[in-house]
Amino acid sequence: MDAMTSLRRCAPYLRPHPWLMAGACEAAFGSMLAGLAMPLVLQRLVDGPVEEGDFAALPWFIGGFALLGVFEAVLLGARRLLVVRPATRLETAMRADVSAHIQRLPLSFHARWQSGQLLSRTVSDVTEIGRFVAFSAIYLIVNVAVMAVGLIVLAWLAPVLALIVFVAYVPMVVATTVFEQRFRVVARSAQEVSGDLSTMVEESVLGVRVLKVFGRGPQTVRRFTEQAHRLRGLELRKLSYTAGLWWIITALPDLAIVAMIGYGGHSVATGTLTLGTLMAAVTVATYLRWPADTLGWLTADASTAAAAADRYWQVRDEPVTVTDPEHPRLLPSPLRGEVRLEDVHYAHPGGRAAALRGVDLTIRAGTTVAVVGATGSGKSTLLSLLSRLDDPRSGRITLDGVDLRELALADLRSVVCSAFDDPVLFSGTVRDNVTLGVRGVDSGSSLGTGRDKAGEGTDGDAAVWEALRTVRADGFVRALPERLSTVIGEGGLGLSGGQRQRLALARAILPRPSVLVLDDALSALDVRTEREVEAALRGGLSRVTTVVAAHRPGTLRLADQVVFLSGGRVAAMGKHDELMTREPEYRLLVQPSLPAPARARGADHAAGSAGEIVGKVETR
Ligand SMILES: Nc1ncnc2c1ncn2[C@@H]1O[C@H](COP(=O)(O)OP(=O)(O)OP(=O)(O)O)[C@@H](O)[C@H]1O
């Protein structure tokens, strides 16, 4: 799409305040007209009282000048005031919309997009658009209008002098058009590189531990510096384009004024032009220099804003594939929590092969099902579909017989809660993080709350402590300086891996889900704590359907049913002990120390993965 079209698409964001924007334009135009009127008063003064030596009228002229000056200043101030509300509203609303859109986009989108790019599109690109709307857009319109009015005034004063100015303007317009096209390409590249830089900063901060232990800090700095130099190069190119245009748009009006003085001086000498008219014409031409000079950077601003709008809409136009149904069905009541997968196929966009290939599975209400498989066999993919992080490409998943796609997403996610092996914690308090999934509680300081100031001891806190107790996290939270109100660093870096996992687990069980999805969510716990947590979960959540991706035989033994995935298909199902005796591939996977199986199904998967998972497997 044309970048200017992208910029025009932002116009509806100004709609709530059309009068303010129109008023700002009028104020800017009015102030310019006041400035333009001064040369006309000057003409009257020179050709009247000055020529005739009648100084009685002088105070009136001085008063007139002062009035026009005050008028110009007041209108300039009014423009600023009028534009503030619509421009800031546009920025706020555009940011809110893109951030809501990003939240609605499926996981496959997030796998494709770098977070730094999303950051720069949400923050700096929107700032560029807001800045353009607040200033440059108005002056781009007003300056062109003032130049047109100025030319008309000049034509009225002295047509030949107007022609000289007009002839100077033509190459300026051509140069500005060429400049705009070139500048926009470089502006776009600079914004992309700036987004990459944001990604690099984010990754180098989040991955600081890995970079340190592998001694990659210097290389990271080098890569960052290279990118920073690339950005500098692009900024310099932008500046060289702007400088070239400046040269043209400052030189041509100057040449026009020289020509006007030459021709006009001769006309005054021969008596075909009054001195007052020449002075007025030169003053008008000088006054028009500002709108002409600013055309360069206003156009540059327009190009930058257009490129920013293009990048903004690129994200906004990403289709939201996981949506609420038009007429959502109510959750079955009472909800039992039976989950069925019927011939479920799924392929990650850009993935080399399908991740799930015709999975049929019934998970009875209140049972615990362990999903096992070699790395890459599709466990996480399967689990992610249960809370509709994406939808199957074909087939369907039901909850108590209702297709998940027929339920409102908020309803579904209030009864299907998940915890992952990578426990994401947000910068905020322990309470913020644990209550993240509770409806009606605005939790998480990264989501902008102040709830934590309420302190401890509320009814809500009792539930939070209960959840923490269930996952054996109450002990270490009690030992934190401010217990539930302790602020944990971004990503929970102040906590151990096992502590973070337990907080994430408490977050998943706090809303009292009907279906609990645990994707390797206990992997960082020591064996004893894991057993305690599992026992507590079985006791406290005995009626909750639990789907867990696990590797440890201890966990598998406790499951009512083990589903063995291989290459995106259900290769076998049953109790752990049964599978150990009848499925050699399964045995190889979970207990590689036992004798090798006679025949391995999907050998490439299992053989390749057995070594990889050694670190994860616990032999008990
Ligand atoms: N975002 C993605 N884009 C493309 N392919 C993906 C993506 N995520 C996963 N895959 C592929 O889909 C397949 C299943 O991945 P999945 O993460 O579900 O496996 P898994 O069994 O959970 O593995 P692990 O035990 O290592 O976590 C793998 O082949 C993987 O490479």
Image: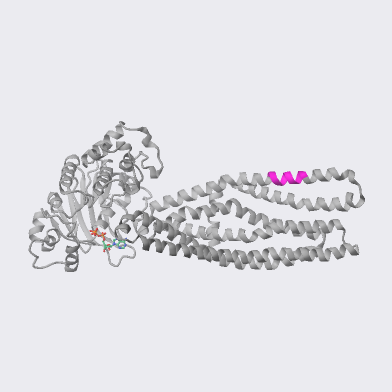
> Picture quarter containing residue 357?
bottom left
Q: Residue sitting at 72 percent across and 44 percent down? A: 71
Coordinates of residue 104 in the picture (x, y in percent): 38, 52
> Picture quarter containing residue 458?
top left
- Give the prevailing secondary structure in the magenta stretch: helix
Specify the color scheme: one colour
Residue 73 colored in magenta in the image: yes
Give the answer, above or below, for where 296 lies relative to 399: below
Coordinates of residue 43 in the picture (x, y in percent): 83, 53
Coordinates of residue 402 in the picture (x, y in percent): 27, 49
Quadrant holding ligand 1?
A: bottom left
- Answer with left or right where residue 534 lies relative to residue 303: left
Coordinates of residue 428 in the picture (x, y in percent): 36, 42
**Camera-side residue of 384 and 467:** 467
Q: Residue sitting at 57 percent across and 54 percent down? A: 132
Q: Does residue 408 appear anywhere in the picture? A: no
Residue 124 colored in magenta in the image: no
Magenta residues (range): 66-74
**Camera-side residue of 166 and 547:** 166
- Answer with left or right where residue 62 lies relative to residue 112: right
Number of numbered discs on residues: 0
Q: Residue sitting at 47 percent across and 64 percent down? A: 229
**Camera-side residue of 347 and 430:** 430
Q: Does residue 131 appear anywhere in the picture? A: yes
